[in-house]
Image: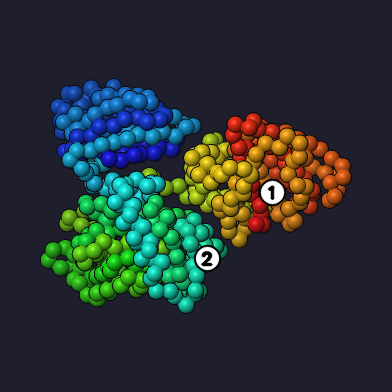
Amino acid sequence: MLLLCWPAGLASPVHDHAEASCWMKILSGTMVEHRYAFPGDVDAAMRADLAAAHDNGHLCLTKTTELGPEAAAYIDDSMGIHRMGNASSSAPAMSLHIYSPPIHRCRVFDEQTCATRQVTIGVANAVHNPFTTADLTLGARFGDALLQSPASPLSEGPATVAALVAALRNTFLHAPPHDTLTSQRVASLLATARLDAAEWDEYVHFSEQRYVRVLLGFNESFSLVLNCWMPGQTTPLHQHENRDAFIRVVAGQLVLQHYSDDDDEQGGGKPTQRDELACGSCRFYSSNSIAAHTLGNETKEAAVSLHVYSPPLLALECSEHQHETVPVVWCSKALAPSTDDDVLARAAAGRVYGSLQTFTAALGRALEQADESGASTCPVQTLLTNFTLSENEVEAHAVSGTSRWLVGFDQRFSLVIRFWERSDEQPSAPHSHGASHTYVKVLHGKFENIVYTDADANEVASSTTYEEGAVFKMNDPSVTHAMRCLCTRSRLGVTLHVFTPP
């Protein structure tokens, strides 16, 4: 069972269902299904008629269906192959898919040539608490194992996934490719990470069909991946294609088996060196020190490992089944997760939906662009205006009363969510922001921003009211100001603040 989240305008490739039945339900938004005849299932005359009618090359379009919220549909291979996509160019959509018998691979079809290739449908991005209580307990156990694992020369490392991703971003910032000092810093970060059980509850889960890969974070310089291994599970034979790789075994034991470049009679290299990776060990493999290899769990206990790849590994292709190419995470680079530049480009064009982690990453890139091109072209305000955060993710930080939460940071900025109670008479204490420029977005409610003529707040220079969704910038960090929440008492007001430098 898969829950699929579709950004505006995104569509799957044309694909089959590996002889399984597929039921789907649209949970939000509007989806469109393009149904095609299986190549070879129509005669020449029918193919010519369909191709002429739909101008669709070699795949023959037989049906187009729009599916709105709560709509349900069914397909199996006897009915053809299809493409599913988000019909909206501005809003996201979600759909639920059930496959029986379960599948983790299918074929995708080129519309012009009918050429096929096999791809996985394994989930790359983690979902929050998706499995049973037993699985969550298992995740907590691995969290305990990580907390007790041997420490490296640095005494304390990042305590959350967000902190680890932020630390990696800072480490790779402006670093040259394959830099020795950067590699040492990354190895230390990975070795000293002390993520608590609550973090693992959200990210550690297992599948009996194959090892699970969870993409925790990435940018143009690196990707951070969590792998969860049941006993006996292993990767296909693969290479990292000029990437540096860092591996931290969080729980259990793994074996990395190297292979020679020479093909044997079965079409693969010959086993050579064998690296046994114990719990707590952290290994660095430079781009020129590792060729074809497999990584797997040969024990009778489950295992968990953290991996950092630089440049980022998002579409690894493997040789298996007689050298058939099978991308492990994404079926094509066109469907790869968005880079920070992609998010900024979409924000410049219109509305973008995403997580705090995605926003934080794009914000860092926006400030880099501002440094490169000058403040007059800074895209931070556009990103704030057009990026819509998950309301559930924001409100997960809410407590009764006024509170502030640091939800993102690096050496260039800090990102704070503030929750406000209504102030009938007094605004917040007058203050300035030192040397930090400040951007504010009203996530919920209505606010008054009061600017004073002097640091002692003796006289009001201006007062401006901002509605929900509004974004404003404090151009002079030395100016003293205060904010007042004008919300009703039924709900807290919420604002998002960017301070740069932090």
The x, y position of residue 436, in whole percent, is 71, 54
In the image, farthest residue toward the bottom = 153
Can you identify the residue that label 1 sits on?
Answer: 438
Colour convention: rainbow
Rendering quarter of residue 484? top right
Q: Residue at x 20, y 64 (%)?
A: 300
Q: In the image, what residue type sits under mark 2? A: Thr
Task: For the residues labelled 1 and 2, say whether their Cβ atoms are less than 8 Å apart.
Answer: no
- Taking 253 as reference, is 73 above or below it? above
Q: Quadrant of residue 485?
A: top right
Mark 2 surroundings within 10 Å by alpha-carbon count, few (fewer than 14), some (14 through 19), many (20 or more): some
Instruction: Please give the label number shown on residue 338.
Output: none
SS for dot 2: helix
Residue 171's label in the rendered image is 2
Judged left or right of residue 429, residue 100 is: left
Q: CA distance from mark 1 to mark 2?
A: 25 Å
Q: Which secondary structure lies at badge 1?
A: strand
Label 1 vs 2, first from the N-terminus: 2
